[in-house]
Image (spheres, rainbow, N blue to C red):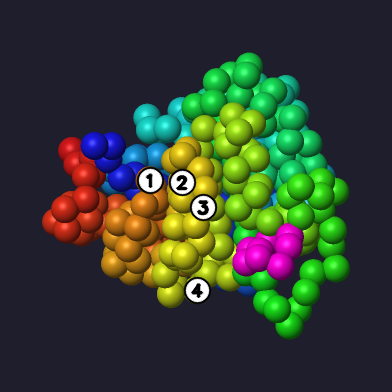
Amino acid sequence: MLTKRIIPCLDVDGGRVVKGVSFKNIRDAGDPRELAAFYDREGADELVFLDITASSDGRETMIDVVKRVSEEVFIPLTVGGGIRSVADVRRMLEAGADKVSVNTAAVLNPDLVSDSSDYFGSQCIVVAMDIKRIIAEEPTDVTASDTSLAIDDDSRWEVYTHGGRNATGIDVLKWARRVADLGAGELLVTSMDADGQKDGYDLELMHEIGQTVTVPIIASGGAGTLEHLYDAARGGSDAVLAASIFHYGEYTVRQAKDYLSERGLPIRPVL
């Protein structure tokens, strides 16, 4: 049985790690190189670095940060934010990333997923999805450019781009199926509604996506307790991503791993 992975997420803005609530009220959380080295020592299974304003600001991902961090850590490193081309994917991998996450660019150009997967292998390509629940009283006025992906009367969640700023009119389950077919090796699923709230992951969302695709799913957005990590991992997510509870010292990675292991989930032990 594959082990469940615990992945600290480091959102980076202006060269610093930051954290917000539902993608707003951003505050500083530390130096990326120092935090990465700390989590490596703590026994994290992987790290995710997301440049949260690269797409909205129209600039490239922080290559210098990736290079510095890759010199400090010996666990898989996923980097995303501002990746727009196969050449960008190559630069990130050459800088030291093990996987590259695409979000906005994948929506704008789905061929980026298939082209990158064909060239580098699906194991290197993570498609990140920023998602909001659809509220019936607040219908979207955005229409997906690809009508086969468009929200319909049965849709419950919508895909957002540019760091959660732009609605797309795209149904989440249709999009998950599409990118999995295009060659995504993993999906990083973030509930914008739950992000930073510490009330738990959107388990219904993770379950529905898990029933739709066969590629691994990383649950993101909402971790506030160790029980939340357990609920998501037990519910079918292959990995759980968290930020606030680790960055601000509420729990350690070791505590999280011990908690999940004691409850019968397969976990890579901290050495």
Given this view, does label 2 or label 4 mark the residue nearer the observer?
Answer: 2
Cβ atoms under marks 2 and 3 closer than 8 Å: yes
Q: Residues within 10 Å of mark 1 (few under 14, many from 20)?
A: many
Residue at point 39%, 51% (across, down)? 237
| SS under mark 3 | helix
Q: Residue at x 66, y 64 (%)?
A: 155
**In this picture, which residue range is highlighted in magenta?**
151-159
In the displayed structure, would residue 57 be above or below residue 67?
Answer: below
Residue at screen point 46% across, 39% down? 214
Tell me the residue that label 1 is attached to.
238
Q: Position of residue 222 (x, y in %)?
A: 47, 67
Q: Was residue 157 drawn as part of the magenta stretch in this picture?
A: yes
Work out how far the residue at label 1 is from the one at label 4, CA to CA, in angstroms. Answer: 22 Å
- Mark 4 is on which residue type? Gln
Residue at image mark 4: 197
Per the image, the residue denoted by label 2 is: 217
Q: Which is more N-terminal, label 4 or label 2? A: 4
Q: Amino acid at mark 2?
A: Ile
Label 1, label 3: how far apart the Cα atoms are: 12 Å
